[in-house]
Image (cartoon, rainbow, N blue to C red):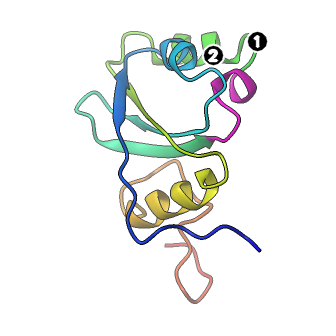
Amino acid sequence: MAPTLPAQIELTWYKFAKLTDARDKFPHEGCVYAQTDKAGRPVRVGMASKGFDKRYQGGDGGAMDAAMHGSGNLVFVAGVDSTLCKLVEDELIWQGRSVLIYNQRGCIDRFGALR
């Protein structure tokens, strides 16, 4: 049976200026994350069900840091049980579908059309 999202789940968010700092804090722990502009407004949501070491291994984290360099953009991360990561990510994307300019998967209305 597929996991279901509890009626309520509390997320504790941590703020990072660099993705590699988030990777250091959540190397192997399932998590969801929001990439934001410098004002903290989310532009993309993602998940790393096996932690950031698996999601952004090797030079990927450094490449993300380089792309963010000087922008003031932030990464917010919340630990989530790995079996719930996809469900939490999907809910965050659905709730933020009108502002998440870099998420298309998950921003589909009930008739199957992109927003």
Residue 53 on the magenta span:
yes
Residue named by callout 2: 61
Element under disc 1? loop
Q: Is residue 59 left or right of residue 35?
A: right
Which dot marks residue 66?
none
The magenta stretch is: 48-56
Can you say whether 16 is above or below 97 in the image? above
Q: Is residue 2 left or right of residue 48?
A: right
Q: Nearer the viewer, residue 2 or 65?
A: 2
Height in image: 70 above or below 43?
above
The residue that disc 1 covers is 58
Q: Amino acid at mark 1?
A: Gly
Locate the N terminus and report the quarter of the image it occupies. Answer: bottom right
Q: Nearer the viewer, residue 73 or 8?
A: 8
Please report the residue visible at 76 percent of the width from the left and 12 percent of the height from the top.
58
Estimate the x, y position of residue 4 in percent, counting from the top left.
60, 70
Rendering coords of residue 112 (x, y %): 62, 83
View extreme (bottom): residue? 111
Which residue in the rendered view is the most extreme toward the left?
A: 39
**Residue at horizontal 36 percent and vertical 18 percent from the top:** 71
Q: Under tag 2, what secondary structure?
A: helix
Q: Evaluate if marks 1 and 2 touch, with contact meaning CB atoms under 8 Å apart.
A: yes
Q: Residue 96, position in %: x, y?
A: 38, 60
